[in-house]
Amino acid sequence: MSKKVTAEDLEYGLSILARILDTQGDEVWPLFERLERELADTQSRRRRVKQHLSLSIPTKERKQRYTKSSSKIAAYNVRYRGDPDVRVLKSAITQLDL
């Protein structure tokens, strides 16, 4: 079982590689660049997820929206059970998340 590499792990590795580069030369430079890219990717992913979480619909509102769309679909089911046009409309309502 492999352990997931964290941003802290990458930062620690970069600090060690920086010391090696400073004292022994550029042989580990490709590894240093790779860890820098991995760290930037990890930080970018975290930042993007945080950004979208801050914009997301609060849980209570999300439940209300879901309940509202479910009740609309249920009303169509009762009124127009077998009508093919209504099935298309139900599908459209579901996709629009009304």
Image (cartoon, rainbow, N blue to C red):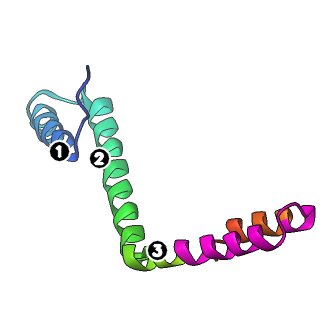
Identified at 69% across, 70% down, the residue is 73
x, y percentage for residue 22?
11, 37
Residue with the most extreme front position = 78
Image quarter of the N terminus: top left
For the point 46% across and 74% down, the residue is 62
First reached walking from the N terminus: tag 3 or tag 1: 1
Name the amino acid type tagged 2.
Leu
Label 3 CA crowd tier, 10 Å (few <14, some 14–19, many 20+): few
**SS for tag 2?**
helix
Above or below, 25 relative to 52: above
Q: Would you name the residue on which mark 3 appears?
A: 62
**Which mark, by number, is residue 11?**
1
Q: Are discs 2 and 1 less than 8 Å apart at CB?
A: yes
Answer whether labels 3 and 1 touch (C-beta < 8 Å). no
Q: Sequence-wise, which precedes: disc 2 or disc 1?
A: 1
* Picture residue at 37% right of the left edge, 57% below the top: 44
Look at mark 2 in the image and give the residue it sits on.
39
> Type of residue at label 1?
Glu
- Is disc 2 surrounded by few (<14), some (14 to 19) or many (20+) residues within 10 Å? many
